[in-house]
Image (cartoon, rainbow, N blue to C red):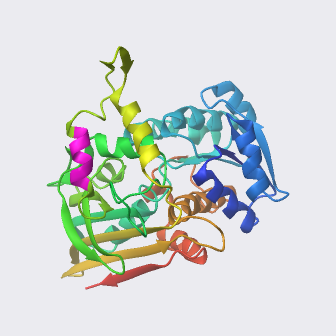
Amino acid sequence: MKAVIIGAGRMAEAVLYDFVTHRTFDAITVADERVARAQRLCAKRGGRLARAAAIDAVDEAATRELIAGHDVCVAATPYRHNPTLARAAVAAGSHFVDMGGNTDVVRAELALDDEARAAGVTIIPDMGLAPGITNVLAARLISSFDEVWEVHIRIGGLPREPQPPLNYALLFSVQGLINEYAEPCLILKDGDVATVPPLTGVEEFDFPPVGRVEAFHTSGGASTLPYTYRGRVRELDYKTIRYPGHCAAVKLLFDLGLASGEAISAGGVRRRPHEVLAERLASALPEGNDDVVLVLCRAAGKARGENRVATYELVDYADAASALTAMQRTTGFPVAVAAAMLAQGVIKKAGAYPPEVALEPEPFVAALEARGLKFTKAVS
């Protein structure tokens, strides 16, 4: 079997590490617009299985040619490229999985369902941490109830040693971080899809062993869950976990318009404020090499005539043995597991599906636990 990874950044590194460690594929192509970057990643993580290639992710014809002959394509690039890559994969007859991040983009990929079915391949977008793992956990919780009143998802990637000014570190793309904080957030309210503003709904709670944290609405994390469970779940929301005070500090920057994409003139130079903000955040925030990822999925409802609350929790740390961060592990490993299941025929249904529909929770969670991600489930 053969796989191709488009992109050669931090999350692609985790996917390649998993493929090589588990000998999932006989050959792996790592493609990036900067071929030297792909070559470095192959030298670092690829062993004798990986080769580097150059690709322009906006060139659909060239991408289709590159993907052809591979059983599965993994996209580890900014989400704006994913519809083009998904179309190219379908045309090449390859399964496709990506890390998502924007629900409008994901819905454009899901619209390729007919084409994917005709080609006999499967598209699974949004298959990272959140969305991704959380979609599958939420689906498992929801399926255990006869009636579901509410589902709450709280996820955070944090530095173990927080530093000012934001008590945060760069764990993934800075532009992706800005988008999470800037765009409307999907929820379920009274059983129907609604939106709330980002950087709102702040709540504080204790999350052992980290301690006191806060959570607030951000975009993208709920993904397709509100659409999938519209009419079945009364209330569903997603919030990002940070150290207390982070939301207020960030919201001030956004309230001042520093996340705007509309160009302004400053000192005779026209710039988009969000570009300047991204540059400053990239400069001011440390790299998140020693991090912790927190996952809390909680559902309440009625099962077999009794009121129940069910939760999944995960606490994962950067791993010294593999030299992977917790964010790399919790984002890259689920993508790698889904890609392996597609290539091996474990997932048999052709078409385009969100994670909560595409994957069976038990084998998926078992595969992640075999990779050291330990989930705790509780029912009360």
Residue 31 among magenta residues: no
Magenta-span inclusion, residue 252: yes
Q: Quadrant of the N terminus?
A: bottom right
Quarter location, residue 260: top left
At 36% from the left and 65% from the top, the residue drawn is: 138
Residue 242: horizontal and vertical position, in percent?
31, 62
Which residues make up the magenta segment?
247-254
Residue reaching furthest left?
190
Q: Residue at x 46, y 44 (%)?
A: 283
Relative to 282, 324 lies left or right: right
Q: Where, quadrant-wise, is the C terminus in this rendering?
A: bottom left
* Residue 30 visible: no
Q: Position of residue 46 (x, y in %)?
A: 77, 56
Q: Residue furthest bottom?
A: 380
- Compared with 233, 367 (above or below) is below
Residue 352 picture location, percent across and down: 51, 45
Number of marks in picture = 0
Q: Main secondary structure of the magenta part?
A: helix
Q: Residue at x 79, y 53 (%)?
A: 43
Specify the quadrant of the image occupied by residue 338.
bottom right
Q: Residue furthest top?
A: 268
Residue 89 vs residue 238: left or right? right
Q: Is residue 43 visible?
A: yes
Indicate the position of residue 82 as horizontal and vertical percent values: 53, 38
- The residue depicted at 30 percent of the width and 64 percent of the height is 243
- Which residue is at the far right? 48
